[in-house]
Image (tube, grey):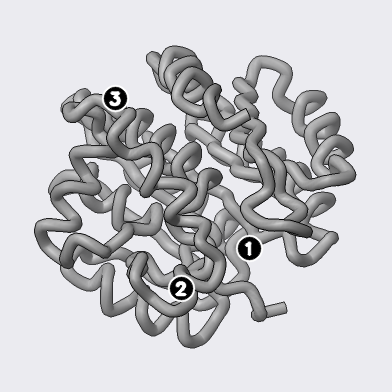
């Protein structure tokens, strides 16, 4: 299924959680003078416009980054990257996670991105060309298995399917377990939606059986509009870098007034 396009949801509350944690983890990992690999399984187009027709139609960005960005300290790596990207692309630009990761990576680091949608992957290639990212138009979980263990071996993988296909809930735990068997030192960061009906719970039970020491962070918030089924957002992190617990606690505090 190729119907999902993140332009309608870029900068929403789930993105704020996912991107703040991603920037925080990469900020810590890039302090060490050792190269790393960044892998993303569902990369989207990499760069979005918050004044686009798609963003205006849902209003999710206004409720997300538009409402919360000033609650992050000015020196927070997420807020710093937002400022740098807007200086480059304009005040209404919003970066997807591939572009946020690129802002954190250094010479010698590697980036592997997968995206299936033909229009999205074409834009992704254009956006990410200055950073030399390896972009593949293929299933992200298959790519994850193909490129691991990566070179450099140290690194982080972000897995964030749309979950429009119900089979994703069953496929993700199996894929992460298989990747971990090949790449047990990698940081594996999984995003998942919390929907009315809690479809994510069986997936989490499988993940927690495979990864009993992983970190789990969930935020609850009101639906973006009447009838919208997403009422929260979660991150499940295997081999979490130092400082991740503190960043999760910060996000819980930032989101608390929304409940």
Whichever of labels 2 and 3 marks the residue nearer the N terminus, that label is: 3
Q: Quadrant of residue 95?
A: bottom left
Q: Which mark is residue 170?
A: none
Q: Label 1, secondary structure: give it.
A: helix
Q: Are marks 1 and 3 in contact (CB under 8 Å)?
A: no
Instruction: Give above or below for 227 relative to 237.
Output: below
- Mark 1, other Cα within 10 Å: few <14 / some 14–19 / many ≥20: few
In the picture of the structure, the residue carrying the numbered disc 1 is 142
C-alpha span from label 1 to label 3: 28 Å
- Name the residue beneath numbered marker 3: 28
**Comes first in the chain, label 1 or label 3:** 3
| Residue for point 39% across, 15% down | 243
Which residue does the numbered mark 2 point to in the structure image? 136
Crowding at label 2, few (<14), some or many (≥20) Cα neighbours within 10 Å?
some
Asked if residue 253 is positioned above or below residue 170 in the image, the reply reads above
Q: Please, what secondary structure does the residue beneath circle 3 have? A: helix
Which part of the image, by quadrant, shows the N terminus? Answer: bottom right
Can you give x and y, in whole percent of width and height, for residue 9 in the image?
53, 61
């Amino acid at each position: 299924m190729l119907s999902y396009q993140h332009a309608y949801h870029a900068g929403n509350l789930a993105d704020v959680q996912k991107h703040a944690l991603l920037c925080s983890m990469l900020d810590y990992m890039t302090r060490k003078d050792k190269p790393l690999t960044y892998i993303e399984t569902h990369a989207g187009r990499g760069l979005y416009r918050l004044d686009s027709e798609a963003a205006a139609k849902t209003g999710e960005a206004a409720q997300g980054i538009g409402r919360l960005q000033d609650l992050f300290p000015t020196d927070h790596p997420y807020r710093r990257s937002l400022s740098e990207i807007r200086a480059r692309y304009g005040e209404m630009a919003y970066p997807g996670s591939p572009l946020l990761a690129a802002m954190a990576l250094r010479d010698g680091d590697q980036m592997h991105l997968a995206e299936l949608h033909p229009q999205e992957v074409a834009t992704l290639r254009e956006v990410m060309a200055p950073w030399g990212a390896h972009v593949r138009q293929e299933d992200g979980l298959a790519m994850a298995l193909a490129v691991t263990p990566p070179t450099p071996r140290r690194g982080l993988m972000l897995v964030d399917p749309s979950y429009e296909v119900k089979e994703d809930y069953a496929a993700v735990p199996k894929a992460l377990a298989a990747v971990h068997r090949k790449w047990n030192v990698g940081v594996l960061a999984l995003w998942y939606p919390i929907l009315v009906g809690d479809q994510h719970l069986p997936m989490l039970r499988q993940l927690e059986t495979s990864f009993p020491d992983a970190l789990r962070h969930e935020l609850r918030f009101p639906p973006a509009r009447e009838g919208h089924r997403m009422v929260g957002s979660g991150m499940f992190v295997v081999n979490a870098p130092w400082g991740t617990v503190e960043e999760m606690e910060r996000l819980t505090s930032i989101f608390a007034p929304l409940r």
